[in-house]
């Protein structure tokens, strides 16, 4: 059984502790976010990455902010409106149907979502479907050890396990980087 985030706690997704634990600019540098890029923020929550990514990629880029929870998308849309951005598009998705055309994005960012997914291979395969040839997947997950924040350890996905899943899904050039004491980033190419 997977651990699912309680949407009633969405205020936890934007607080000083989380901003410290998930430094947006550092993450964008690690994942190689580029001007004009079309990206998917899969499991966007309240738009924590979607809105800064929309600013970072500029008006020629597009961010697809995707989430299974309508209340998260509503909050993201509110934040998009406040930001004045025109290049962030939202969609309520299903876990294994991201609701955008294949070969649409050059980067898929998936932050603290995979540990909540039951069928990880199916989820990664669906993400692969929306990636262009040579597209990149960037997954940020909780390090599989006890910390003072985050889901229970037995619900976390270790970097070795995730690397094997990506290999099974035919991703290549897989790299793992420890972000801090809480998270790691795994990057791979289609």
Image: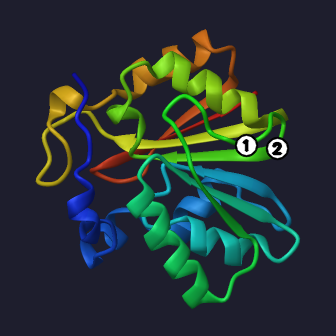
Label 2: which secondary element: loop
Dot 2: few (<14), some (14–19), or many (≥20) neighbours within 10 Å? Answer: some
Where is 180 relative to 11, above or below? above
Report, in whole angstroms, how far the alpha carbon at label 2 lies from the one at label 1.
7 Å
- Residue at screen point 63% across, 62% down: 29
Marks 2,1: beta carbons within 8 A: yes
Determine whether, in the image, residue 84 is placed left or right of residue 12. right
Quarter of the figure with the C terminus: top right
- Residue at screen point 60% across, 14% down: 167
Nearer to the camera, 115 or 172: 115
Image location of residue 59, percent across then percent down: 84, 77
Mark drawn on residue 27: none
Nearer to the camera, 53 or 76: 76
Q: Which residue is mark 2?
A: 104
Q: Which residue is mark 1?
A: 100
Q: Nearer the viewer, mark 2 or mark 1?
A: 1
């Amino acid at each position: 059984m997977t651990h699912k985030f309680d949407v009633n706690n969405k205020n936890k997704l934007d607080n000083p502790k989380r901003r410290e634990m998930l430094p947006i600019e550092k993450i964008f540098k690690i994942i190689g976010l580029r001007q004009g890029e079309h990206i998917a923020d899969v499991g966007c929550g309240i738009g924590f990455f979607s809105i800064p990514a929309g600013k970072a990629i500029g008006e020629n880029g597009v961010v697809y902010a995707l989430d299974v929870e309508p209340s998260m998308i509503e909050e993201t849309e509110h934040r998009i409106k406040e930001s004045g951005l025109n290049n962030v598009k939202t969609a309520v998705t299903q876990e294994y149907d991201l609701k955008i055309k294949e070969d649409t994005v050059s980067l898929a960012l998936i932050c603290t979502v995979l540990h909540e997914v039951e069928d990880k291979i199916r989820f990664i395969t669906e993400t692969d479907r929306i990636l262009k040839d040579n597209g990149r997947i960037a997954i940020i997950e909780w390090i599989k050890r006890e910390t003072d924040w985050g889901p229970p350890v037995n619900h976390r996905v270790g970097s070795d396990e995730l690397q094997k899943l990506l290999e099974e899904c035919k991703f290549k050039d897989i790299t793992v980087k420890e972000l801090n004491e809480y998270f790691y980033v795994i990057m791979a190419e289609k």
